[in-house]
Image: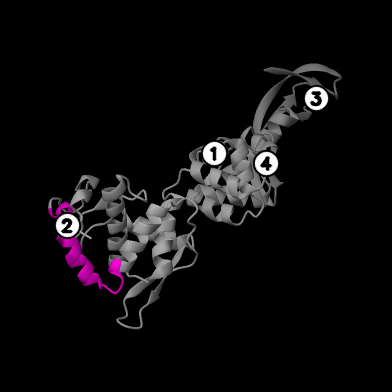
Amino acid sequence: MEKMYCFECNKKVYGKIKKEKTTYIIHGRKVVLDDLVFICSNCGTEYNYEDIDEHLQKGYIAYLNLFGLSFEKLKEIRETLNLSQELFAEALGWSKKTINRYENGKSLPQKEYLDTYISLLNNKSNIYSILKNNNNLTKEKYYKILNRINVEIDFKSINVILYILNKVKLNRTQLMKYLFAIDFLNYKLFNKSISEFKYAHATYGPIVNDQDALINLLIKQDYIKLESSFIDNSMLFVPLQKADLYNFNEQEINVLNKIINNFKGMSANELTDWSHAFIGWIKTKDGEIIDFKYAKELDI
């Protein structure tokens, strides 16, 4: 038995606590809560057993659960991107106070803000599109945020691909060879690759490891699209955005241009034959990562 003040009896009385399901409408969505109800043992009057704040919190939690979210998940989404509350707020164009209230369960995201969280939950690379559409960011802040973000594909790697495709349309095999040659040549000359890609041994020569995931993400994020070639009906990658070269130095631009100029006009078969002569491909097995130590053997 629990004790609670009964306004009908005008005194504290003993009573029973029962659970009953109650439906509420929160932001237009039905939410069913297990409400705790106190029943006065003297007069039978029923009272909500929880205080308003506790009840409201339960409603918030149930509402977020409808979308696979929680207050803890909101914080996790931000931390997965490696952003502080301040930088995350600036990236989204919100206030830091708003982010803080969401993560601490003090406020429930409105529909527009909730959609942003859902988008980032489904694919954290969507942060790139959000940043691109945020016209209030200074250039310095924009790149500060980009340099902090931790996603499946880093911003510079995406722009290596865009730079190549801005110059020439390529099929999948050709693009893989361009990327491989660029990174291995830069490593040979300056002891570091330009992109963050790793390259694996495949039948038609070196390819970006997990190339399918890479291509699918770039298409989904509207960086590139596929179109049919009028020459041989092969599928070519076409860029949907201009490359952003802010983070590239002159040496890297020179390497990019060297490979593009050297490979321009070469067919997929020709590029495959060229890559098959590379010692790094010869000494690895199907699916194995090709070590950059072989870059010194690259012949361009």
Disc 1 packing (10 Å; few <14; some 14–19; many ≥20)? some
Q: CA–CA distance between discs 1 and 2?
A: 41 Å
Quadrant where the C terminus lies? Answer: bottom left
User: How far apart are the alpha carbons under marks 3 and 2?
Assistant: 89 Å
Q: Is residue 209 visible?
A: no
Towards the viewer: 296 or 205: 296
Question: Does the magenta stretch mainly form a helix, a strand or a loop?
Answer: helix
Instruction: Tell me how far mark 4 sits from mark 2, CA to CA.
Output: 57 Å
> Does 296 appear above or below 50?
below
Say which mark, if any, is on residue 83: 1
Tag in front: 4 or 1:
1
Of residues 16 and 63, the one drawn nearer to the viewer in this rendering: 63
The magenta segment is 262-282
Q: Quadrant of residue 45?
A: top right
Q: Which mark is residue 43?
A: 3
Residue tagged by mark 2? 278
Which quarter of the image is occupied by the N terminus?
top right
